[in-house]
Amino acid sequence: MLRDYLAESGVASELYAKVPERANLVARLPGRGGGPSLLLLSHTDTVVADRSEWQVDPWSGELRDGEVWGRGALDMKGEVAASAVAIASLAREGFEPAGDLIFVAAADEEVGDGYGLPWLCEEHPEAVRADYALNEGGGERIELAGRALYLCSTAEKMSSPFRLRVHGRAGHASMPGIADNALTKAAPLIERLAAYRPELRLEEEADALVQTIAGQKLGAEEALALARELDPYAAETLEPLLSLTLSPTMISASGQRNVIPSTCEVVVDCRLLPGQTQAEVEPLLRDVLGEGDYDFEWIEGRGGTRSPLQTPLWDAVAGFVAEADPEAAVVPICVAGFTDSHWLRESFGTVVYGFFPMRTMDARLASRLIHSADERAHVEDLELGAECFRHVARAVCG
Ligand SMILES: [Zn+2]
């Protein structure tokens, strides 16, 4: 459908597929040469939807009161559609960019089974290499301390979960004295993690955010105190950007009620600041956990990349906001989760921001609808997004 839609406006696209039913689409307005390239990145897959929880059929795309309802409306078929409209309308107007304008609709982001962008970067790097890119992960309009702000995500935390395997000795549960219960030995370790207050630090994104709101430079502690004073939402947004976070989320021990477990496994969701490494953090965590009969093991380390803030892409985004919403400012933000952006940053050094502007729908409502029931996007926001991409394309590769 996307390929046919683009072809009608004379935009050529290519399908790249690891398996035929999970094709990625790459469309391109070739540059006349000599300018930087810009890639509009999105994904076409979604998370699942349970019909019984929804007011409408989640796969209908029903238009109701100016909103498109359906799974993926916000995350992120809306942005897929806006990107397609932007590139097709530019082509119809005869836009000839200096560098390539590229549109990538990747097939696999939510699960990450290797059909989407990482596979494209590995197998077809020339199809997706670009100097600049816009992706999901930002664009909300929020009001803080009387200022309207659009959040543009320029960095992402690293997903860095770890496992603790606590050792004991099995035994019959009726005679606790003969065993060494790994589950109860895990309890103080979990409590130490819960009590730990990591040192706060103000990275460049949070620093720029705070300076815009406060009008001056502040320390990390002061900034958090100010955010708490202004708005609980501001504090909730800021706090995870100031340090690594630790959330113990899973535990498993004995498989049988009457058997005292010889091992207990605790999985901790841990997010590092961009630039923080596992090697730097591990001694710190071992210190927090203290002595004990356990093994510590990282499960993975994904994301944790950033792009610089002073770039032509930033100027283009800020220029769009100045034109479309003159009272508002754009501020950089580091997001707590991660998106496909890191693949482009790691593979090609691409400057990638998450920015898809949204002002008609309330940002807090939108964040509750993503991956949830009754997901929907306002048509005015989709139009705003398409306008934004057209503006940025002209500014960056025009
Ligand atoms: Zn998404």
Image: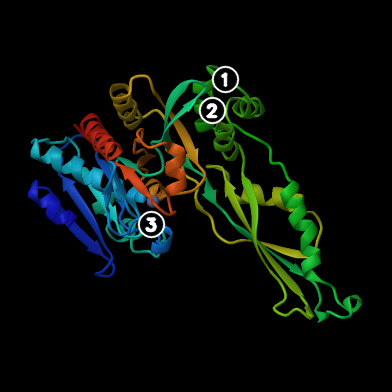
Residue that sits furthest to the top in the current view? 215
Side of 110 where 43 appears, left or right: left
Residue that sits furthest to the right in the current view? 177
Identify the residue under disc 3: 109
Identify the residue under disc 2: 207
Side of 116 where 258 appears, left or right: right
Identify the residue under disc 1: 217
Where on the picture, by quarter, is residue 321? Answer: top left
* Alpha carbon separation for disc pair 3 and 1: 37 Å
Q: Earlier in the sequence, mark 2 or mark 3?
A: 3
Q: Earlier in the sequence, mark 2 or mark 1?
A: 2
Badge 2: few (under 14), some or many (20 or more) residues near its Cα, within 10 Å?
Answer: many
Quadrant in the picture for the N terminus: bottom left
Q: Nearer the viewer, mark 3 or mark 1?
A: 3
Q: Nearer the viewer, mark 2 or mark 3?
A: 3
Q: Is residue 148 above or below residue 279?
A: above
Tags 2 and 1 in contact by the CB under 8 Å rule? yes
Side of 354 where 259 appears, left or right: right
Q: Is residue 309 above or below residue 338?
A: above
Where on the picture, by quarter, is residue 264? Answer: bottom right
Q: Residue at x 48, y 20 (%)?
A: 146
Q: Residue at x 34, y 56 (%)?
A: 56
Tags 2 and 3 in contact by the CB under 8 Å rule? no
Q: Is residue 303 above or below residue 314?
A: below
* Alpha carbon separation for disc pair 2 and 1: 7 Å
Q: Residue at x 27, y 54 (%)?
A: 61
Callout 3 amino acid? Glu
Q: Is mark 3 within 8 Å of ligand 1?
A: yes
Callout 1 amino acid? Lys
- On the image, the x and y values in percent for residue 161 come to 59, 57
- On the image, the x and y values in percent for residue 247 come to 64, 52
